């Protein structure tokens, strides 16, 4: 995972098809799933945050076939970065308003 600001910006715009300056958080993972980079626009500049695991792998969620992206809720992102497997957890049946 060698990409920096410009490379992650281009991936967000071209491959995922979203505006990197929208305020969304874009999360990228390397092939072996041992490294994660996060791209975020805070209104005045881009942030790139990275995490490398010393042992183990991130439990990366499966994308729908033919789709280049996966949408995660804030809570799911926190679980992912903390090492909790998303496919082994389940949501309560609470009311949730979908973000627009």
Image (spheres, rainbow, N blue to C red):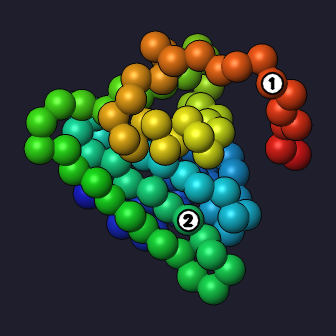
The local secondary structure at tag 1 comes to loop
The local secondary structure at tag 2 comes to strand
Image check: 70 left or right of 95? Answer: left
Residue plotted at (55% across, 36% down): 76
Q: Position of residue 3 (x, y in %)?
A: 33, 59
Mark carried by residue 40: 2
Q: What is the number of callouts on the image?
A: 2
Image check: 48 left or right of 1? Answer: right
Q: Position of residue 43 (x, y in %)?
A: 68, 80
Of 47 and 95, nearer the camera is 95
Q: Which quadrant of the structure image shows residue 67? A: top right
Residue plotted at (52% across, 42% down): 77
Sequence-first tag of 2 and 1: 2
Task: Point out the residue furthest to the left here.
Answer: 54
Q: Which residue is mark 1?
A: 94
Q: Position of residue 18 (x, y in %)?
A: 69, 51
Q: Residues within 10 Å of mark 2 (few under 14, many from 20)?
A: many
């Amino acid at each position: 995972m060698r990409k920096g600001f410009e490379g992650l910006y281009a991936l967000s715009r071209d491959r995922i098809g979203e505006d990197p300056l929208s305020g969304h958080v874009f999360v990228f993972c390397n092939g072996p799933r041992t490294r994660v980079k996060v791209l975020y626009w805070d209104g005045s500049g881009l942030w790139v945050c990275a995490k490398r695991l010393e042992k183990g792998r991130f439990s990366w969620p499966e994308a729908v076939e033919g789709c280049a992206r996966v949408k995660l809720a804030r809570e799911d992102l926190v679980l992912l970065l903390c090492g909790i497997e998303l496919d082994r957890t389940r949501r309560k049946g609470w009311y949730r308003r979908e973000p627009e």
